[in-house]
Amino acid sequence: MKKIYQRVFALALAAVMLLGLLAGCSSQPAKTEAKETGSGEIVIALITNTTGEYAQYGIPVHNAALLYFNKINEAGGINGKQLKILEYDDKADGVESVNAFNLASDNGVTAVLGSVLTGATIALADATYEVNMPQITASATAAGVTLIDPGKEDSEVRTNVFRSCFIDPFQGEKMARYAVEKLGAETAAVFYQTGSDYSEGVMRAFVETAAEVGLAIVDTEAFADGDKDFKAQMTNIAAKNPDVVFAPIYYSEAGLAITAARQAGCTAPFMGGDGFSSVKDYASAEDLEGTVYCSGYAPGTDSVKQFEEDYRAAYGEDVPNMFAPLAYDAAMILVEGLKGAEAKGLAPASEEYKQAVIDTIKAMNGVAGVTGSYSFDESNNPIKSAAIIQLTGGEEIFKEMF
Amino acid sequence: MSLFFSQFLNGLQTGSVYALVALGYSMVYGIILLLNFAHGDIIMVGAYAAFYSMTAFHLHPLLSVVLAVAASTLLGVVIEKVAYTPLRQAPRLSLLITAIGVSFLLENGAQLLFGSETKSMSPIVTGNVSLGSMSISKVALLTIAVTVAAMAILTFLVQRTKLGKAMRAVSEDMGAAQLMGISLNKTISFTFAVGSALAGIGSVLYLCAYTQASPTMGSMLGLKAFVAAVLGGIGSIPGAMIGGFAIGLLEALCSAVNLSVWKDGVVFAILILVLLVKPTGIMGRSQAEKV
């Protein structure tokens, strides 16, 4: 009997020990299993306008962002997970961007890079804000991208939306100060596009700052989308003979406006925002001489050299404008955010993961990109300085930081 | 005063291009009662022809102009032969829809072929002429001069030549003209050729003034020229000339009084007004519909 007791006891002991051993192991395999389901890929939507009228902005954004994402993938991805990029063309149309986002949502998207023009980006931001989807734009500069009601002082912030470029009011402000401090202007004429968030936003900030710094606005002219004929407006401006003409418009219209102004006998230098980027191809060198604009990127400086070489190697052409490096930075910022979420061991596309991406970006403090270092203010706008580019002999040449 | 004169010149310059395009609309309508909505896009093709012959093939500007006009003319005739001739007996609505289809085909075809972005070139004509205290751009003077010359040649062609006579006859009564031994096909093709050639001239003048070509450049231009043709009295050649200049001057006037944003609205309001008040336009004759 005793022997049996001993045997049962021994068996029970062995069973307990075995159980203990199993229990000790059990947490380990469970963990590796969780990792296995989580690895694989992180889905990012890249929404840009690669066709249509403003494709000149969209294509560089698309190419440069892909360049960065591919670099990350070649280096082994984030936390062993590859980035899967869903590419969409929204033709700079807000409806198309939202459609693209809905499509991406059906495919388990975790973060969005896009859109390119202000109007489409705001439409997209409305959609991403509803589901707290991390979004970053490389180029949409209107205050209304990150603020729901930019007209109000204490507007609600779209906490999920970031950008790598600076904002419209910032450009208008900078250029009004630049006109007075560096160009010695006393009078200015303003020429803007109605119905364009970008143009009206920069224009308003310019006019407000002009009043502060004692720059008199002698004439305000405007045009509607699709207009090509600016002779009549330029004749009016020429008659007022201002010291500078501030035109917060895009390159192709800017080229037409400057050509028309010179034909109307207006010799004042033109000033613009970052929409002037690549204007050199849209008017003669002679007419453009002395034109200045502010930009988020100064070509050829040390910090962008490596990027410029990589871009040339990948796409067989030079970096066309500042949207490429800004998109490269936007992709970098997004990847930083993803790394933050991965570090917490969350599963991609989950609510917590998205929030972690947003929190990581928001808390960035001087992370270096190719166009400058990034921190974000309370409205999710980057804190950085502007490069002033001047047209000299038909080339866009970096003049100074301002 | 000098500001007024400058704006007047601006209006004449814009109006010149409108008038040249409006002539094409009016002539084609006059002869086969077709609103050729593809006409604006012929300008676009002409502009691309001029653009490429100057930038890609580095041809002399004058030769490029000839090429652009030739390309426009050829395109106009080809469109007529391929798209409109087979439908000559079909209801007029079918023709109109075909015209819109051709317009879309040209615009999207151009996007496919040349890319969707705006193409820009260095100005062909530069510099200003000083006249007292005013400076007038050479482009404006050239545009107005070329337009007036083109109109003079057209008037001569229509009034004094045999083909012109045939055109007027077909326009008046197609059946009777045919009975009198006038070749219908030849005359209609000729009308399209002349209208498209004028559009070609317009495209070069447009390129001189704006130095940019884009696939959709013809659509708004075409619509405004259409309004000009209706204002002048569609079907009437002098009417199209007057209408074109009137629309150009009106636009300049809008901008001069700081209403440039409303420019397009005003132009289309004119269209509505003309159709409501005097559908025959300034120079049009009212015709009793034969029943």
Image (tube, coloured by chain):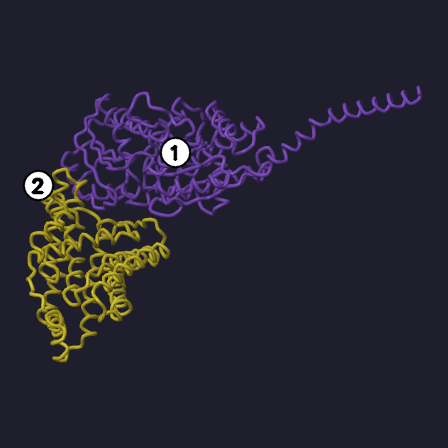
Chain colours: A purple, B yellow
**Residue A280 appears in which quarter of the rendering?**
top left
Q: Which quadrant is the C terminus of chain B positioned in?
A: bottom left
Residue B102 horizontal/vertical position (percent)? 28, 61
**Amino acid beneath label 1:** Ala
- In the rendered image, is residue B67 in sight? yes
Q: In the rendered image, which residue does mark 2 sit on?
A: B2
A6 to A319, vertically: above or below = above
B111 and B58: which is toward the camera:
B111
B49 and A391: which is toward the camera:
B49
Q: Residue placed at 33% from the left, 23% from the top?
A: A155
Give the alpha-carbon distance from disc 1 to disc 2, as whole Å: 49 Å
Say how many tags the image has.
Answer: 2
**Chain of the residue where label 2 is placed in the rendered structure:** B
**Chain of the residue where label 1 is placed in the rendered structure:** A
Q: Which quadrant is the N terminus of chain B positioned in?
A: top left
| Residue projecting furthest to the top | A2
Mark 1 secondary-structure assignment: helix
Q: In the rendered image, which residue does mark 1 sit on?
A: A125
Residue B245 horizontal/vertical position (percent)? 11, 52
Closer to the camera: disc 1 or disc 2?
Answer: 1
